[in-house]
Amino acid sequence: MEADGLDWLLGPLHQLVSWGAAGAMVFGGVVPYVPQYRDIRRTQNAEGFSTYVCLVLLVANILRILFWFGRHFESPLLWQSIVMILTMLLMLKLCTEVRVANELNVKRRFFAGAQGGLEGTAADQCSNQPVCLFLLFLSFTVAADNKDEEIKAPPRRSYLDFEPHHFWRWSSFGDYVQCVLVFTGVAGYVTYLSIDSALFVETLGFLAVLTEAMLGVPQLYRNYRHRSTEGMSIKMVLMWTSGDTFKTAYFLLNGAPLQFSVCGLLQVLVDLAILGQACAFARHPQKPAPHVAHPASAKAL
């Protein structure tokens, strides 16, 4: 009798918990990128975030969506991939705009410094009037010749140039969108032709989750190579670890395909390794090198 009386409470409560867990799965993966996005907008500096993270997550989630057509899994996991793709496109748009603007600003500062140096030299030589007039004429001539160059944007890099050195460092957000659409179209066509092959479908799912699971490896390598975690937020790493732990538990409890559980376990191990690096390098910090610029990487849940 008492059990029957509690059914009215336990039923809606169970449904509410299920909805909450599903919502956390859909939107939890993008939460660490909210402070990263705000920091980039505030500082107008994207050096601490690698756009290759966006590349890996776009590939992984596109493949996961294609895997869904061959083997249906829970809807929250499908919506998670869609939300993550949109988030990575927003991150790419912001990082591209900031990087191009910074390259133009550097060019302007270099031009202004060169012009100022010529004018300063002319002023120093003004004791000799003919030399003074010649140097002033030279400085204004150089300024006139370079004025158009000073206001021009850096040379445009497009994915249609097929230059490996500039891969995924293009000058326009539209190039990234076109590349993603081409990859989606090719992968979708291959999937359509091979959708009846169980081996192909399982391999596709394995590639999707393995790509995502290995996302933290570039961050591990970057930290090891520079012997530093500069530019990496410890709070964000803690959010990765807690999110990956929750996600792995969700996969195991809801009977998700085996590939998802393996992905979650690998991600947790990588997160713990990155946290270990942060602790180790904090105790033994490296002496700062003379202005060595290096992009940091980041990772997703």
Image (spheres, rainbow, N blue to C red):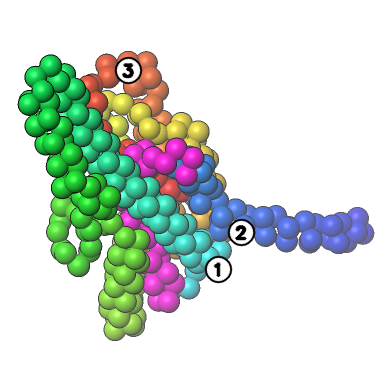
Q: Are marks 3 and 1 in contact (CB under 8 Å)?
A: no
Q: Which residues are magenta?
A: 41-70
Q: Are marks 1 and 2 in contact (CB under 8 Å)?
A: yes
Secondary structure found at label 2:
helix
Image quadrant where residue 56 sits: bottom left
Circle 1 residue: 75
Circle 3 residue: 285
For marks 3 and 1, give the one nearer the viewer: 3
Quadrant of the image for the N terminus? bottom right
Tell me if residue 111 comes above or below residue 199 in the rendering. Answer: above
On the rendered structure, is 248 left or right of 170? right
Secondary structure found at label 1:
helix
Q: Amino acid at mark 3?
A: Pro
On the rendered structure, is 123 left or right of 193? left
Between residue 284 and residue 206, name the one nearer to us. 284
Residue 51 is inside the magenta segment: yes
Mark 3 closeness class: few <14, some 14–19, many ≥20 residues within 10 Å: few
Q: Which mark is residue 22?
A: 2
Identify the residue at image location x=70%, y=55%. Answer: 17
Q: Position of residue 284 (x, y in %)?
A: 32, 15
Q: Can you see residue 242? A: yes
For marks 3 and 2, give the one nearer the viewer: 3
Mark 2 closeness class: few <14, some 14–19, many ≥20 residues within 10 Å: some
Identify the residue at image location x=38%, y=19%. Answer: 282
Identify the residue at image location x=44%, y=61%. Answer: 85
Identify the residue at image location x=49%, y=40%. Answer: 42
Q: Position of residue 99 (x, y in %)?
A: 33, 47
Image quadrant where residue 289 sits: top left
Residue 217 is inside the magenta segment: no
Q: Are marks 3 and 2 in contact (CB under 8 Å)?
A: no
Tell me if residue 80 comes above or below residue 230 in the rendering. Answer: below
